[in-house]
Amino acid sequence: MAAPPLKGIRVADFSWVWAGPYCTLQLAHMGAEVIRVETARRPCVTRMLPPWADEKFGLNRSGYFNQYNQGKRSITLNLKHPEGIAAARRLIEKSDVVAHNFVRGVMERFGLGYDDVKKLKPDIIMVALSGYGATGPLSSYISYGPAQVPLAGFSALTGYAGGPPMHTALSYADPNAGVHAAFAVLAALYHRRKTGQGQFIDASLWECAAALTTEGLLEYQMNHREPARRGNRDPWMAPHGVFRCKDLPEPIGGGVVDTWVSIAVADDDQWQRLCRAVGRPELASDPRFALASARKHNEDELEEIVTAWTAQRSPQEATKILQDAGVAAFTCAANKDLAEDSHLNRRRFFVELDHPEIGPRKHCGIPWRLSRNACRVQAPAPLLGQHTDEVLTRLLGYSAAELAKLREGGALN
């Protein structure tokens, strides 16, 4: 197979937390050499988040950090030290892409803004992921991904009828912006290959998230009303939602664990299939449920009937019966279900690499395949500063004596 598509591309990664590292993770998956610039003075937030391997805290033991930094290298530089800035500038001169997710003005204060770095390397590509973008009245506001979920309209659409807005339980804005930014980097690299020109990529977490909530925006723009919250229900499909199944036979942590199956019936034909599958063929012609409009009108009663059937079965059993009948259904998977799933494991979605501190651990790998390019996770996530000496001497040209002086002076903290 051919080499990964970004082999030979180097990324100076000044990002942290989730959005920026998720962007550069995609680039690493495609073969780019990603060098994370970190600091021991203020470690990345995700190095300090659980779960920790063997429930033992350590800056190199976070499953969160180790998942989203696979295949990268790590160097530590003190960007408040002039020699640390000098080393960062040398790294940028040797790189193709610079990534960061600081609010507007931070990189400029370091002398590493786009106007600064393009003087070092005119064809450099810089991607900046910030909450509100690099321009506009809110561009200097500090942001975290979870706040972007309600700000982008997700929470207004999420929740049960008559209830308050709800959080989605996941910071969609972070990885979503990371994927958008990685796509923009690919486009910029393609443009540079054709023209020799670098450029600045301004990515806004808010805008990337808002692009996913167009249903609500269009409802307001076209009809001047806010969409109602519906819980797990759909405006047209019924039944549509998650339905209670049998509890797990064995308690976990001393408590009973409930299980659920998701079901989505898109049209009347699928409804007839469901009726036959659950042994209630007469419901297909019942005037309360025969047509989609009638099912929506009688949705409370409909869900009681479906739940009476699912409650007698495991999610896996319900899934197989309905899928065999041509009805969209699947288990609401717990983490254990995902980790042990035969389909995901057969497709080699999970990778197990030998981390230098915590040993072999399983992580989610690359969620796509290229038939002609050999993309794979190259290495486990790096230890904090693991590659500092190697990168500064072999790539940036520092001598051993210079390296020792930098370290003694605090430039590598």
Image: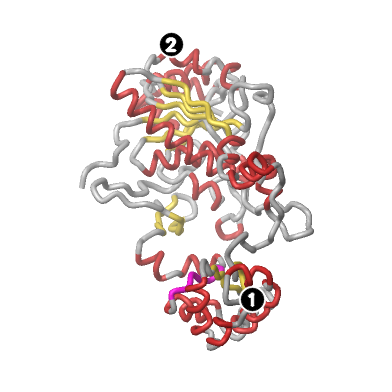
Q: What colour-coding does the image apply?
A: secondary structure
Up the image or down, 285 lies above or below 393; here it is below
Q: Which residue is mark 2?
A: 119
Q: Position of residue 90 (x, y in %)?
A: 42, 19
Which numbered tag is attached to residue 244? 1
- Neighbour tally class for label 1: few under 14, some 14-19, many 20 plus, Cα within 10 Å: many
- Rendering coords of residue 351 (x, y %): 40, 57
Q: Which three-letter amino acid code belongs to the residue tagged 2?
A: Lys
Q: Which residues are magenta?
A: 326-332
Q: Is residue 40 visible?
A: yes
Residue lying farthest to the front in this orientation:
287
Quarter of the view holding residue 3:
top left
Residue drawn where x is 57% and y is 21% of the image: 107
- Element under disc 2: helix
Front residue of 182 and 47: 182
Does 123 appear above or below 39?
above
